[in-house]
Amino acid sequence: MIQKEALVKRIMMSLFGVVICAISVGIFKIAALGVDPFQSFMAGLDALVPIDFGTLYVITNAVLLLFALVFDRHYIGIATFINLFLLGYITQFTYDFLHSLLPEPSMAVRIACLVIGVVIICFGSAFYMTADLGVSTYDAIALIICNTWKKGKFQYVRIVTDLVCVALGVGLFLLAGGTVALIPTIAGVGTIITAFFMGPLIEFFNVHVARPVLAAKKKPKQ
């Protein structure tokens, strides 16, 4: 019974973390100052492929899921599928809703959205990671390369995969007709922040929020 309750708590934490992360990506898109490396790739793909972002996200991650299932499926778990099926649609809903409220946000509002997006994505990531029920299909790629294929240390492999994502995203964006001047909207300061400076804030939320939530025991009924 205890194990079942613990699993339910972990699933709820994974679900909560994915929803928060999805909302943060929508906020990043409103800020238009750059998104995380994988979302830079998705933004370029979204500009080129004429289907809804949520559906495109599911299709893209399904392809990456096949890669993970073939080479090392132990990184795949419940949270992987929560991320796969929910994040794209929630991101699109969040962006559409905020865009209806802020059709032409000022630079001050965009910067505020960037700061809020960074804090929220770190908060959500802490819950998602602490739940430990599988990683996203994109995270699985770097883990397979370094742990299964033994092709380098994770931090360096991740930098390479992030750079590849950003390069592909920019290339697809330009191929879709985007201008060089608009590249910072998908690969800008927000991309740099999410790629290199999120770790300490995620760890802060891990230590002070997510892990205590996971460790908290349900009080018995009187």
Image (cartoon, rainbow, N blue to C red):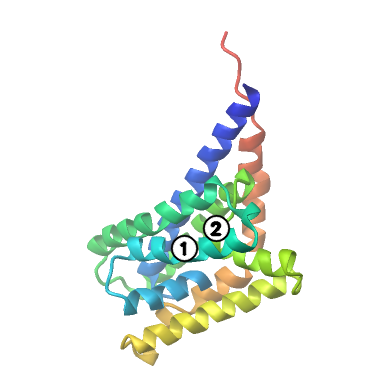
Q: Which residue in the structure is indicated by mark 2? A: 136
Q: Between 177 and 183, which is closer to the camera in this rendering?
A: 177
Q: Amino acid at mark 1?
A: Asn
Q: Quadrant of residue 13?
A: top right
Q: In the figure, 221 relative to 189: above or below?
A: above
User: 179 above or below 56?
Assistant: below
How many numbered discs sit on the rendered protein?
2
For mark 1, what is the residue? 61
Residue 198 falls in image quadrant: bottom right
Percent position of residue 6, x then y? 61, 31
Q: Position of residue 183 (x, y in %)?
A: 41, 85
Q: Residues within 10 Å of mark 2 (few under 14, many from 20)?
A: many
Work out whether residue 28 can be spotted: yes
Relative to 154, residue 182 above or below: below
Residue most extreme to the bottom: 180
- Considering the image in quadrants, where does the N terminus appear? top right
The tag earlier along the polypeptide, 2 or 1, is: 1
> Cβ–Cβ below 8 Å for labels 2 and 1?
yes
* Residue farthest toward the top in the current orientation of the protein: 222
Point 56% across, 54% down: residue = 125
Q: Tell me the number on the disc at residue 14.
A: none
Q: Residue at x 68, y 46 (%)?
A: 207
Point out residue 87 in the picture as x, y percentages from the top left corner: 42, 56
- Residue drawn at (53%, 48%), measured in percent from left and top? 79
In the rendered structure, which amino acid carries the disc numbered 2?
A: Ser
Q: Secondary structure at mark 2?
A: loop
Residue at 65 percent across and 44 percent down: it is 208
Q: Residue furthest front?
A: 70
